[in-house]
Image: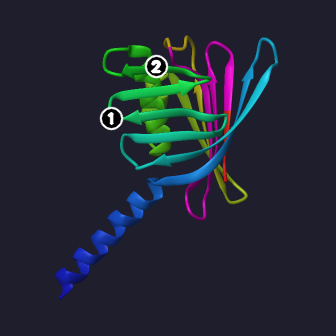
Amino acid sequence: MKRFYLIITALLFSFTTFAQELIETDFTQTKMMKVSGKTTDKIGHISFDGNDHLTMTYTVPEGDYFIIDGNMVKINMDGKKVEFDADKVKMVGLQRATLLNCLSNNWEQAAEDNNAELTVTEEKGFRNVLIQAKGKVPKGGYKSVELTYRMSDNMMTRMVLEEAIGIINTYEMK
């Protein structure tokens, strides 16, 4: 009987850990170009399975998408469709890995991949994660990544990605 309880406990722990990595929510995205100060707002839905499948479909503008399906990265932004094999395009591979690691709470790997320092703080019911470049940012890497999680359910509520080229994307999850 004791073995049965241990198995059930292990299964519940596994399910809870996996469930915390699942993301299924609407979001808003604000893209800002640092040089010009120009901003663009988008609205969409994000679905992440906790592994290597991420889908961001946009309702504004309708038809845009960003999909990670294994090693493949598929993008349709402003009517321009592209598809990359992340194993063959190093820059895309780094961005793919960073996104998946951040969404999976594997911040240490995201920091290492981007030659960055990792700082994690907790305040007023939120966990704040900052991944800040230490020096030269690898091509396609991020100068900084800011993540905010609601501690009550470990749900990511905000993600800010600052690219080395001066583009800042802010995602607010609903």
User: Which labelled disc corresponds to residue 127?
Assistant: none
Q: Residue 167 lies in magenta, yes or no?
A: yes
Q: Nearer the viewer, residue 43 or 118?
A: 43
Residue type, numbered disc 1: Gly
Residue where numbered disc 2 is placed: 82
In magenta, the rendered stretch is: 140-169
Residue 153: in magenta span: yes
- Mark 2 lies on a secondary structure that is strand
- On residue 70, which mark appears? 1
Q: Amino acid at mark 2?
A: Val
Check the image and report above or below for 46 versus 131: below
Looking at the image, which residue is at 57% across and 19% down?
Answer: 134
Measuring from the top left, give residue 74's x and y in whole percent: 44, 27
Residue 5 image position (x, y, % from top left): 25, 82
Mark 2–mark 1 Cα distance, whole angstroms, equals: 16 Å
Q: Is residue 7 above or below residue 68?
A: below
